[in-house]
Amino acid sequence: MKDLENIQELMADIGQRAKAAATELAIAPPEAKEQALNAAADAVWAAREHIIAENTKDLEFGRNKGLSDAMMDRLMLDEARIQGIVEGLRAVAGQEDPVGKVLTEWDMPSGINISRVRTPLGVIGVIYESRPNVTADAGALCLKSGNAVILRGGSESLYSSSAIHGCLVDGLRAAGLPEDAIQLVPTRDRAAVQELLTMTDTVDVIVPRGGKGLVGLVQREARVPVFAHLEGIVHIYLDKSADAEKAVNVVLNAKTRRTGICGAAECLLIHEDLVDGLGTAVIKALLDAGVEVRGDEKLQDIEGVTASSAEDWGKEYLDMVIAARVVSDVDQAIEHIQTYGSQHTDCIISEDPEAAKTFFARLDSAILMHNASTQFADGGEFGMGAEIGIATGKMHARGPVGAAQLTSFKYLVVGDGTLRG
């Protein structure tokens, strides 16, 4: 009981300090936020050897915990990935500040002028697994959008996340911004997550970033509003008009570039006219790349393909495994995706504009792609500098959540002694 009380006190204190910081951040000048992020980027690069050393401790913890190869890949930091963190911080720093931006403005016959402007949400709680780079991405985007943030990383990434968090605080200090604007929960205790989900007095929204288990837990138990980030059950449909070179290259990149990210392809749908030609070529290319292909009955004659089961449809492997089945046309492909997809990212490979138009119109995934790798499902690739996650819900934010998506809006009404008749 004493430990639980300590966690409650810890989280209540973090929440109160975040709320106070959010009040200051809401009116912080854009130049100060930009300075903080650039200084944080400098600090990360200067501390790269220390961050990698701390990451080694996390990797050992992850191995002892029995994390999968895909999760270990998400957890691992090297100099190239730290360079990516630095570039992400600088990219967010250089973006237009969303706070106070006028979204629209109009005059009314009554004589009042109305404008709708972006305003921060307040305090954002981010709960994430494995990927320590989320510490930097989430911290940067929340700061840029004028929000304070409470970060609760996975237990396996505590050392790496703490090292990166220290660099973010260095940036805040250099710019004269409140150090409580970016806080990291300093414990692996799961009770801290439970507390964060119910802190309605101090936290305005929760963003979960992780697997189905984490997101499900947050959605079930949160009393604070949630930006849902569900698993990425990503489909690619090879239409009968698909270009052979595009199809092979896009599918290989979408599956194998990085298997552990949410934009990795998990299911390949092949038009029946392509089975003996391009469909087989694509599958052989996957097999040659080391991908296990679990195919339906119509694909099992291809050497190397293993039999699929009912569990393979709608599964996020996050590994060198892909499900594959034959469909009769774009309509059946759409039906399959509507049945088994997660409304994250889905792609059509086609040279037929009408097929692509149908695919885009009838599916309601957060991201739909035509002749492009699904690994582009990333805020950085969307020009957002970084992302806090891919929201698959339909309320407020959807798709990659960048700085602009972490704002709400308010109406400013101006008159000149104007009275309502």
Image: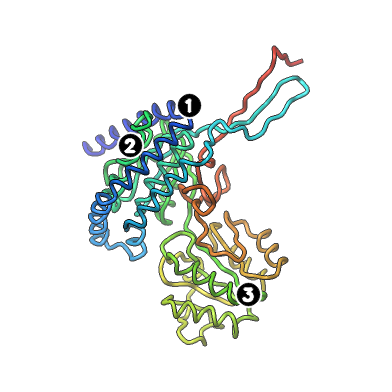
Q: Amino acid at mark 1?
A: Ile
Which quadrant of the structure image shows residue 408?
top right
The residue at which mark 2 appears reads as 169
| Mark seen at residue 388 | none
- What element does badge 2 sit on? helix
Say which residue appears at 59% left-offset and 70% top-offset. Answer: 237
Q: Amino acid at mark 2?
A: Val
Along the polypeptide, which appears first: circle 2 or circle 3?
2
- What element does badge 3 sit on? loop
Residues at discs 2 and 1 in contact (Cβ within 8 Å):
no
| Mark seen at residue 243 | 3
- What element does badge 1 sit on? loop
Q: Amino acid at mark 3?
A: Asp
**In front of the other: 417 or 300:** 417
Which quadrant of the structure image shows residue 223?
top left
**In front of the other: 333 or 83:** 83
Left or right, 60 with reference to 139? left
Quadrant (top left, top right, bottom left, bottom right) of the N terminus: top left
**In front of the other: 310 or 398:** 398
Locate residue 38, reporting x and y percent: 40, 40
**In front of the other: 153 or 295:** 153
